[in-house]
Amino acid sequence: MLANDYQNACMRTVTEEFTLANAGLGLAGECGETVDILKKYLYHGHDLDRDELIKELGDCSWYLAVIAKMCDIDLSEVFEKNIDKLMKRYPEGFSKERSIYRED
């Protein structure tokens, strides 16, 4: 599925009452749920619940797509600009040195 197709499909479930504030808080909440799964796996001895992780990452993606759309931004542009930024910052791939001494 293409990013903008996903974004448009997400908008099918957004109501007129849904606000940018609701979307921002929702994203934060879903990110927290994602982090909790990872915390339990990394530090509490739980098995990694792959299906739950996929669901929570999907919820994060939904809010991201909706926030972008509400701000008149195509999700593909978000992805492209992020990759452009990373290519400039880490042209040879990630390095600790470039992470510490960033030019931008």
Image: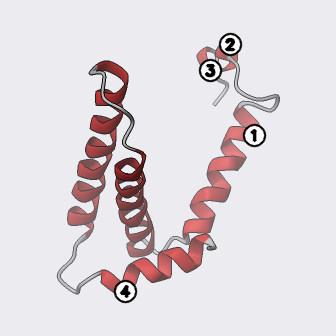
- Contact (Cβ within 8 Å) of mark 1 with mark 3: no
Q: What SS does tag 4 mark?
A: helix
Task: Check contact, mark 2 vs mark 3: CB within 8 A.
Answer: yes
Pinpoint residue 39: horizontal percent, then vertical percent.
Answer: 31, 28
Location of mark 2 (residue): 97
Q: Residue at x 68, y 39 (%)?
A: 86
The circle on residue 99 is: 3
Sequence-wise, which precedes: disc 3 or disc 4?
A: 4
Disc 2 residue type? Glu
Tag in front: 2 or 4:
4
Which mark lies nearer to you, 3 or 4? 4
Q: Amino acid at mark 3?
A: Ser
Q: Residue at x 38, y 70 (%)?
A: 66
Would you name the residue on which mark 1 appears?
A: 87
| Residue at figure coordinates x 28%, y 29% from the top left | 40
Q: Residues within 10 Å of mark 2 (few under 14, many from 20)?
A: few
Tags 2 and 4 touching, CB below 8 Å: no
Disc 1 crowd, CA 10 A, few/some/many (<14, 14-19, 20+):
few
* Residue 48 in the figure: left or right of residue 83: left
Q: CA distance from mark 2 to mark 3?
A: 5 Å
The quadrant where residue 74 appears: bottom right
Taking depth in this image into account, of 95 and 55 the one nearest to the observer is 55
Nearest to the observer: residue 34 or residue 47 = 47
Residue 12: mark in rendering: 4
Element assignment for label 2: helix
Could you tell me the amino acid type at mark 1? Met
- Where is residue 92 drawn, in percent x and y? 82, 28
SS class, disc 3: helix
Q: CA distance from mark 1 to mark 3?
A: 13 Å
Q: Observer-nearest residue: 25 or 54?
A: 54
